[in-house]
Image (cartoon, grey):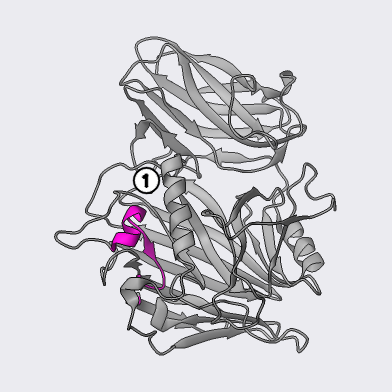
Amino acid sequence: MTARCDSRLIVFLLLFLACVSAPAAGRTFPAPQMSYLDNGVVRIGVDLALGGAVTYLSSKSPDHPGNLINSADLGRQIQMSHYSGPWPFVIGDKQPSPQWAGLGWNPIQTGDCYLNPSEVLEHRNDGHALYVKCRPKLWPMDDVPAECVFETWTTLEGPVVHMRFRCTNARSDHAWYHPCAQELPAVYTISRLSRLMAYTGERPFTGDTLTHVTNDWHQPWPWTRFLATERWAALVDEDSNWGLGVFKDDGGEFHGGIHGDGRTDDPKAGPTAYVAPIHRENFDHNIVYEHETHLMVGALTDIRQRFNAMATKTPPAWRFAKDRQHWTLHNATDQGFPIPGEWRIETGPKPWRIEGPTFAWRADPAPIARLEISLHSQAAATFRLRWKRLDDDRFDDRKSLTFELPPNGGIQTREIDLGGSEDYHGLITGLSLEPAAGLREGDTLAIRSIVLGKTRSQ
């Protein structure tokens, strides 16, 4: 993701912390219209007057009563929030609020900065599963529905909340915009859950010591960006390490922290705690973007044990059968959404790369990168596969290997011996692929899959 897009998300998250934004002065929240699921262990509630966002989550234990979700303004709750261009986003003569103009296209589940709530289009609750479909509002605009729909599916399993999300885009603007960070979802809690805990070390799933992730909310960027190598983070209280955990099995990057002085159980208070799993995405005009995230209410030790049992332990495998698998394009274009069985990247005038999602895996069980790949060109070309380790801020040539592809356009299987490099060891956190030599503007690279494993194919 570009630094420009990072800065917009930073500004967005910071400004969301104002209890009442200036454009909404004098307006009031709509009366709640709650729909609950309750399995005797946890109780979760969505507000149908606010786009079906989660405004209530509590344990049924008498030792930990009360709502954990902060709703001091329309930018908190547990809610979907997506980002793309242009910057600023304008519709006809409708301009964005000046304080939010830099956000670009930004539909959110609860409503907009003028306190206009998003509209629920459909709702079902049979006591076991809760479904909501809404037309989100564009946060920077005054009462402008986005050209997309949001859907959420929620079920309960003991103390775990399983949530599935879908954004279906139908934007009239078909322009191509660079990748931006997406909150998957944003989670705001009461400020009493002030300790942000995660495992960020080299030995995930071994019981190694957890990290207390800290932040300085007085800074222009109030949150901390971190890699949770067990793919979960939790906001817990200082007294008993009890609170709310968030797990994303295909992720690793999180943003979070505490904002404001004072610690309280009041869900309407200004101080709040925040955490969100993050993926960076090219958000197409017609994308159908789906993901899953799991929440858990309980003690920190129980949260870790449950989420680590749920985590996939095999090396990553990305198969581009219908989407980009959270990989992103930089200075290149592709066929757009949907991906018809293979991902086709077209070379433009600038040096380009594709970059995989932030995800942690150990090098030892994954020394071979197997690529199903083809090149449509008039001449052979060389490509460079890079990797990052946990202590790396960015990709570099030292941690890379090259391979050549013929120009005939036929699918090739290329097995890259990453383990043969002395720099491929420890915890790996990402891959990228780029042309190294021989590629010309208009040439096309097609990728069916990138799979990491232990042994070469026979």
* Mark 1 crowdedness (10 Å alpha carbons): few <14, some 14-19, many ≥20: some
> Is 374 above or below relative to 300?
above
On the image, the x and y values in percent for residue 327 come to: 49, 40
Q: Is residue 317 visible?
A: yes
Of the pair 311 and 319, the residue shown nearer to us: 311
The answer to whether residue 380 is left or right of residue 162 is: left
Q: Is residue 114 visible?
A: no
Q: Quadrant of the rendered structure where residue 104 is?
A: bottom left
Q: Which residue is at a point 69% across and 64% down the rendered structure image?
A: 234
Give the magenta range. 97-117
Q: Which residue, given by chain and number where applicable, does mark 1 sit on?
A: 338
> Is 431 above or below relative to 417?
below
On the image, the x and y values in percent for residue 29 come to: 39, 84
On the image, the x and y values in percent for residue 146 come to: 29, 64
The answer to whether residue 433 is left or right of residue 199 is: left
On the image, the x and y values in percent for residue 10 come to: 48, 53
Of the pair 98 and 79, the residue shown nearer to us: 98
Q: Magenta residues: mostly which secondary structure?
A: loop
Q: Which residue is at a point 64% across and 40% down the rendered structure image?
A: 316
Residue 431 in the magenta stretch? The answer is: no
The amino acid type found where label 1 is placed reads Pro
Of the pair 386 and 15, the residue shown nearer to us: 15
Q: Quadrant of the C terminus?
A: top right
> Is 229 above or below relative to 61?
above
Residue 113 in the magenta stretch? The answer is: yes
Q: Secondary structure at mark 1?
A: loop
How many numbered marks have been drawn onto this rendered protein structure? 1
The answer to whether residue 366 is left or right of residue 222 is: right
